[in-house]
Amino acid sequence: MKFCLMLLATTIVLAPALAAQVQTDVPPPVPGAKAVTVEHIQVYGKSLEGNLEANAAARDVFVFLPPSYANEKSRHYPVVYALHGYSIGADQWTHEIHVPQTIEGAFAQGAREMIVVLPDSKTVHNGSMYSSSVTTGDFERFIAHDLVTYIDTHYRTIANRQSRGLVGHSMGGYGATRIGIKHADVFGSLYIMSPCCLSPRTDPPNPEIARALEAVKTPADSASLPFLTRAQLATAAAWSPDPRNPPLYLDLPTKDGVAQPDVLARWTANAPLAFMDQYIGNLRMYHGIAIDVGDQDGLRVDAGKLHDALDRYGITNSFDVYPGTHTSRVADRFQNHVLKFFNENLCFRPEGCR
């Protein structure tokens, strides 16, 4: 079974995605929609070299080229980078948002053509958190630098921040928030879907989970962990790496059953609601910022806090609470809201992008 990660301030809410997949509202194919071209490639990440978990530096990437790409050889296109959630990779993400059908539907309904890129960021513990860690690899830089550079080099893109959009769901929503806040020089518009992990963690895991985490002795042990426990291990690998603590090369928020405040402080340092005040100048650079979340999603409160924080600084953003759960509308949202948003907020004319 597949699950989506939803970190709250002191707990993790689970949504079994196998059931959620059945409930996902998939928009019907649009009559007359033209086919996009799908390329499954690998992109080597210099930023991922030498990571202590031995996660692959060459990452699977799905590139969706618009209908006109093959014939209009002189035309260049904006690019949208779409980040998957915890426990799924790029391939599973294509099924969750039902691409290429939803991309084709968006174009058929009036969205201008753009390139859509889905990178894989799965790790030994099932999720990179799109963070910078010697243990997992620097996935933040991989997305913001290595991947963007590769796509601009190998495809006919408009290589300008105003023509690059970043979107993600759940852990990917956290990634879009984190990377977006720190790399406004790379991206021009952000769409944040049901983001996890926004608020600081203040409490260690409950005793049962803490004991299970401390019992892990090898990276291979991670595969047999319950979802909740494995998610916390992925968090520790991303946010409290420790190159002097083999074989997992991470520090846990408990040791011998005792809470480790210094580790929790390092986790807090990775919470966007804790660090975004340092990057307000970056956030003011965006042409558009959108946030959405379901009214039955446990992440609704923190998504609202992000919206409120942006409002507090006078940073224009939209916040949409739609009827649904964490995954029940993700494909519909991607076609009818995400790509529409980027149609309205990206620069489509090379000569008009500054």
Image (spheres, rainbow, N blue to C red):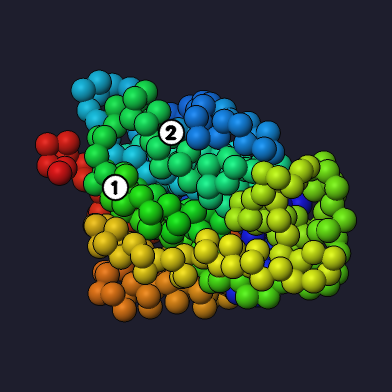
Residue at position x 29%, y 32% from top?
Answer: 157
Give yes or no for contact between labels 2 and 1 (Cβ–Cβ under 8 Å): no
| Residue 276 versus residue 68 in the image, above or below | below
User: Relative to residue 312, is residue 119 drawn left or right?
Assistant: right
- Circle 1 residue: 185
User: Relative to residue 105, is residue 246 drawn left or right?
Assistant: right
Q: Quadrant of residue 112?
A: top left
Q: Residue furthest left?
A: 351
Q: Amino acid at mark 1?
A: Asp
Alpha carbon distance from label 2 to label 1: 14 Å
Crowd class of label 2 (few under 14; some 14 to 19; many from 20; radius 10 Å) = some
Residue at position x 76%, y 66% from top?
Answer: 254
Crowd class of label 1 (few under 14; some 14 to 19; many from 20; radius 10 Å) = some
Place of residue 34 in the rendered image (x, y in percent of width and height, measured from the top left) = 37, 35
Residue at position x 58%, y 62% from top?
Answer: 266
Give whichever of 296, 302 is nearer the camera. 302
Place of residue 141 in the rendered image (x, y in percent of width and height, measured from the top left) = 45, 41
For label 2, the SS is helix
Q: Amino acid at mark 2?
A: Asp
Numbered circle sitting on residue 146: 2
Place of residue 136 in the rendered image (x, y in percent of width and height, measured from the top left) = 62, 43
